[in-house]
Amino acid sequence: MPESKRSSSWIDILMELVEVFFKSSRRSTKGRTWHQHVVPYKDAWAVRREGNKRITSKHRRQDTAIRKAKQLARKYKADVIIHREDGTIRDRISYD
C-alpha cells in the first residue's frame, strides 16, 4: 500500500509540473505584438518587429522603411513606431 501512495504522489507532482509549464508558455505568447519599429541601422534604416533582435528589412531611406512598416502593420492590425536618428520616438501610427 505505501508503494501506491508514493507513485500516486509522484504522478500528481508530474501533472502539476506539466500544468505549470503549459500555463507559462501560454502567457509568454500572449504578450507578443506585431508592432513595427522603423529604426536607424548602421548608415540606413530598418524595420524591426517589436521584441525581435533581428531586423525584418533594411532600407537606404527612412520613407521606404516607413512604407514597408505600414504594409506589415496594416496586415497584422498593429502600430508603426517611427524613431528619429538618435533613437527617440518621433511618431506612432495605429492600424488596429
Image (cartoon, helix red, strand yellow):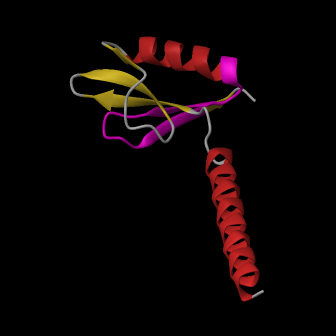
Count of labels in the image: 0
Q: Position of residue 27 (x, y in %)?
A: 67, 54
Tell me if residue 5 comes above or below residue 58 in the rendering. below
For this rendering, which residue is in front, 3 or 94? 3
Whether 88 is among the magenta residues is: yes
| Residue at image coords 37%, 31% | 54
Tell me if residue 73 comes above or below residue 64 in the rendering. below
Q: Position of residue 60 (x, y in %)?
A: 30, 12
Q: Which residues are magenta?
A: 75-92
The quadrant of the picture occupied by the C terminus is top right
Q: Position of residue 43 (x, y in %)?
A: 21, 22
| Residue at image coords 67%, 60% | 18
Residue 89 placement, left or right of 6: left
- Residue 11, picture quadrant: bottom right
Residue 48 placement, left or right of 71: left
Q: Position of residue 95 (x, y in %)?
A: 71, 26
For this rendering, which residue is in front, 52 or 5? 5
Which residue is outermost to the front?
A: 1
The quadrant of the picture occupied by the N terminus is bottom right
Whether 10 is among the magenta residues is: no
Which residue is outermost to the bottom?
A: 2
